[in-house]
């Protein structure tokens, strides 16, 4: 951990931290450290407080107004569940009538906080000593939450619901550009986690890129996106599950949408129409794009390419839509000729399924003028194309 938590858990350090407030990346940290040292504060304390002030600034994106009342580690903040997403987890337990939950591997306590806020009694278990201390601080205002430092696998969770966020182990497999995870690559292992799920209503948080092959039968698998970011895969077992199904959940500007399916319908490919749509990543990763396309009378622009097309102008948070203006060969000279003739000065460039990068192409274009457009580089019916479009 980048600073010892003991240096922060003193009245002097916490008072100084609250006085400083969050520090953004533009802050002159060197001058600040010098000033605080000249005021008589010890070097170790100053380092711990300044690091924490910078983490609090970053934490606003996940915890909003609560960020300035919590303590963090670098890894703990990175792995912590965003507050609006953690609230969804907690609601599952409350809706299932579960009043006691064991959070096994609680990290800095984000999910335990959301559970406790719904009057659920929480046992938060964390093996790492300093991370457990951070969770204890963050949960101090909840009398119905208790933090213990222990191995998650050693806990008796009888008559409790279970929340598990297994950590990724350090993996070093030389000579492989893509690492395919196995159950043993997690701590605790997925084999242990799924055995545990047979004994209690259980929610398991995994990375959104987790292989579908690792998902067991007889659970609900839900991919969650928050404000455009695909953030997690949740597996729900027992009373927490809505059945053996796949779903995509979208949280955007405080609004929630759910699309349910089985993930076995392949999308039909069709000719590019007047509109082209970029789907939310939760639909893509959940393998529900085919079912979604069928429901909305849309088709894929090409096999295995996650762009949809249709004749109707659709407005839905699941899709970002564009009206097609021109279809060009995917050739820099042809694209450059178009932007010059149409005085395009601002060009958004998107790609899927082709090897050219937006950065590469942009260097070859003479963007000048007051016009704006979106360029989508992709395959249409298997052929590489450049689609000029306007957002709708």
Image (tube, rainbow, N blue to C red):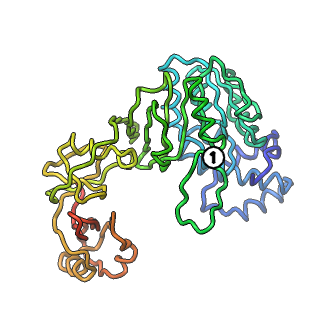
Q: Residue 253, located in which quarter of the rendered image?
A: top left
Q: Residue 143, located in which quarter of the rendered image?
A: top right
Closer-to-camera residue (370/73): 73
Q: Taking the image as drawn, is residue 257 in sight?
A: yes
| Residue 72 picture location, percent across and down | 68, 45
Up the image or down, 167 lies above or below 160; here it is below
Total marks placed: 1
Residue at image position (14%, 57%) is: 274
Tell me if 146 is positioned left or right of 268 in this view.
right
Up the image or down, 220 lies above or below 331; here it is above
| Residue 155 picture location, percent across and down | 72, 27
How many other residues sit within 10 Å of disc 1, few (<14), some (14-19) or many (≥20)? few
Tell me if 162 is positioned left or right of 334 in this view.
right
Q: Secondary structure at mark 1?
A: helix
Closer-to-camera residue (139/229): 229
Residue at image position (20%, 42%) is: 296
Closer-to-camera residue (139/46): 139
| Residue 103 picture location, percent across and down | 64, 31
Tell me if 27 is positioned left or right of 296 in this view.
right
| Residue 256 picture location, percent across and down | 38, 35
Tell me if 368 is positioned left or right of 210 in this view.
left
Residue at image position (28%, 78%) is: 368
Closer-to-camera residue (184/245): 184
Q: Taking the image as drawn, is residue 113 in sight?
A: no
Residue at image position (66%, 19%) is: 158
The residue singled out by tag 1 in the image is 184
């Amino acid at each position: 951990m980048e600073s010892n938590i003991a240096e922060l858990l003193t009245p002097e350090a916490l008072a100084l931290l609250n006085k400083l407030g969050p520090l953004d990346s533009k802050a002159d940290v060197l001058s600040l450290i010098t000033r605080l040292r000249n005021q008589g504060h010890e070097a170790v304390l100053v380092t711990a407080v300044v690091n924490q002030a910078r983490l609090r600034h970053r934490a606003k994106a996940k915890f909003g107004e609560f960020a300035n009342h919590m303590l963090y580690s670098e890894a703990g903040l990175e792995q912590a569940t965003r507050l609006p997403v953690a609230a969804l987890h907690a609601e599952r337990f409350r809706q299932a009538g579960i009043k006691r939950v064991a959070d096994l591997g609680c990290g800095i306590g984000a999910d335990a906080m959301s559970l406790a806020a719904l009057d659920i009694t929480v046992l938060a278990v964390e093996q790492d000593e300093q991370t457990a201390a951070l969770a204890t601080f963050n949960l101090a205002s909840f009398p119905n939450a208790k933090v213990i430092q222990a191995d998650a696998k050693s806990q008796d969770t009888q008559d409790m619901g279970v929340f598990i966020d297994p950590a990724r182990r350090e993996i070093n497999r030389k000579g492989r550009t893509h690492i395919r995870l196995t159950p043993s690559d997690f701590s605790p292992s997925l084999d242990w986690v799924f055995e545990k799920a047979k004994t209690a209503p259980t929610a398991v948080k995994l990375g959104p890129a987790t292989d579908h092959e690792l998902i067991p039968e007889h659970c609900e698998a839900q991919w969650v996106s928050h404000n455009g970011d695909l953030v997690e895969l949740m597996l729900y077992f027992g009373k927490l599950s809505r059945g053996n199904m796949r779903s995509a959940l979208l949280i955007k500007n405080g609004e929630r949408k759910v699309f349910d399916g089985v993930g076995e319908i392949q999308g039909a490919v069709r000719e590019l129409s007047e509109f082209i749509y970029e789907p939310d990543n939760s639909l893509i990763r959940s393998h529900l794009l085919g079912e979604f396309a069928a429901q909305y009378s849309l088709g894929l622009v090409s096999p295995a390419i996650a762009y949809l097309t249709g004749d109707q102008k659709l407005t839905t948070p699941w899709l970002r839509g564009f009206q097609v203006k021109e279809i060009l060969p995917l050739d820099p000279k042809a694209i450059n000729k178009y932007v010059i003739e149409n005085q395009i000065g601002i060009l958004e460039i998107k790609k899927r399924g082709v090897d050219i990068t937006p950065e590469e192409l942009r260097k070859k274009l003479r963007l000048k003028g007051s016009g704006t457009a979106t360029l989508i580089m992709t395959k249409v019916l298997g052929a590489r194309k450049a689609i000029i479009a306007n957002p709708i």
